[in-house]
Amino acid sequence: MSVARYRIGRREVAVVIAKRGNRWRVVVQAGRDPLTGQRRQLSGSAASKTEASRLERALLAQAAERVAPRIMLRKVVAEWWQSGPRLAPSTRANYRMNLDRHILPLLGSRQVSEIRPRLVASFLVHLADKGLAPGTVRKVRTVLSAVMSYAVAMEYVESNPVMKVPPPELDAEERVASTLEETAALMLAAEHHDPEFLTYLWVAAEEGGRRGETLALRWGCVDFDMGVLTIDATITRGDDGVKLRSRTKNKKPRRVAVSSHTLDLLAELKRRPRSSSRSRQVRSFVSAPTTSCSAAASAAAATRSTGGRRTRARRRADSGASRSWRECGRMSTSTACATR
């Protein structure tokens, strides 16, 4: 009797060849089924030792198919998606788009065992040659890596080949914030043409939140007495549509002090009749001017009121905005004349 051990994927397979009478019996023990716990065993008999060796190779090939089955990437993606990966709604929609647009058309029909580092590198180069920006290629790589990590967890492959391929370098683009002059012109134009949009700009500038967080503010989040906004939710767009989520991206609510003028604008908005559905829909997709928040906050104190009870943080918000606003005093006057 002879016993040999082989490794197939992450598992060890034992092969026993023993002569019984005039025949040779070959048994391949491939561990246990992870679901039922039953032994995985393949066996057969041969008339000679040479035939027993050929039978051993055939049984090992069958064991390899059971231990590490040949499965296409498309099916792995379907299994992973059905398992319900924990993704934010907007992230889930972005992952689905990258899967359907970039990954599945080129790699979906490949066996998951064929996804090797060299293939991944060629795939990323192909995306770049098609004109995709480095940031987009990095996102596609992230999605493919998530799929292959699931394949590793399910023991379809031994390692994640995507992790062995570095992402493309991002272009060093300079981020240019709006100047005080540009911010003042924007504020004055909004005041003249769209007072509700002006309120959004002031609030977004002072509280400095993400676009979805600003759009998710409700009246219950505004403390008019203390001059504080509570940011505790966000609006996101996912495969289930545009929804109000009851927590922010970092899952922690925060409180932000705002100036008196912002509170006055909010109070005026609260008294004003609600806008038409079309107007609200247009404003739902406006990008918050996060790059010009400091300049917009400076403009926020131009016409602020001084009445009412203010907290220390609120007084700091007013005084800081006032100092910055004075830096563009003459400009704001001339721009106001030109706008009006």
Image: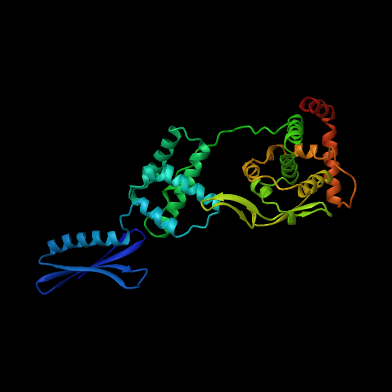
Nearer to the camera, 165 or 218? 218
Name above or below for residue 210 compared with residue 7: above
Q: Which residue is outermost to the bottom?
A: 21
Q: Which residue is outermost to the right?
A: 307
Kindly identify the residue that appears in the image at 64 percent across and 57 percent down: 247
Left or right side of 78 for 238: right
Kindly identify the residue that appears in the image at 50 percent across and 39 percent down: 136
**In x, y percent, where is residue 25?**
17, 70
**In x, y percent, where is residue 153?**
43, 59
Kindly identify the residue that appears in the image at 40 percent across and 57 percent down: 79
**In x, y percent, where is residue 84?**
47, 59
Nearer to the camera, 115 or 74? 74
Location of residue 294 by image quarter: top right
Name above or below for residue 195 compared with residue 244: above
Nearer to the camera, 119 or 305? 305
- Quadrant of the frame with the N terminus: bottom left
Number of marks:
0
